[in-house]
Amino acid sequence: MRKAGLDLDIVKQKINELKGKNIKMQINQGRKRYVRYTGIIESTYPCVFVVRINSPSSVETLSYSYSDVLCGDVKIVIDAT
């Protein structure tokens, strides 16, 4: 469900400001399953953004749409460490 008070253009702008910074992400995979990642937003495109995940075993890239953030399925926080 869409959160009130947010607009897709505002979400795009905020994610574009986070480009190149360390972030923490929480992804809702449904049925009360959440996955947490730390990574860096590598690039932004008109419909999606790409995140490079820093995992101990390998480095992988994942892409998410801005609507995932708007709906609350993807939560992004700046990593202070």
Image (cartoon, rainbow, N blue to C red):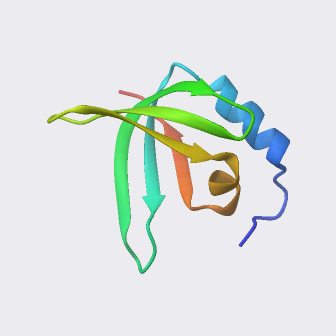
- Residue 26 visible in the displayed image: yes
Counting from the top left corner in percent of width and height, residue 9 is at 84, 40
Name which quarter of the figure residue 4 lies in. Answer: bottom right
Query: In the image shown, does 31 or 3 lie closer to the viewer?
Result: 31
Residue at point 68% right, 27% down? 16
Residue at point 81% right, 47% down? 8
Residue at point 74% right, 42% down? 11
In the image, residue 20 above or below residue 13: above
In the image, residue 45 above or below residue 1: above
Counting from the top left corner in percent of width and height, residue 6 is at 81, 53
Counting from the top left corner in percent of width and height, residue 22 is at 44, 26
In the image, residue 4 above or below residue 47: below
Name which quarter of the figure residue 81 lies in. Answer: top left
From the viewer's perspective, tell me whether residue 70 is left or right of residue 58: right
From the viewer's perspective, tell me whether residue 1 is left or right of residue 72: right
Looking at the rendered image, the quarter that the N terminus falls into is bottom right
Query: In the image shown, does 45 or 28 lie closer to the viewer?
Result: 45
Residue at point 44% right, 53% down? 26
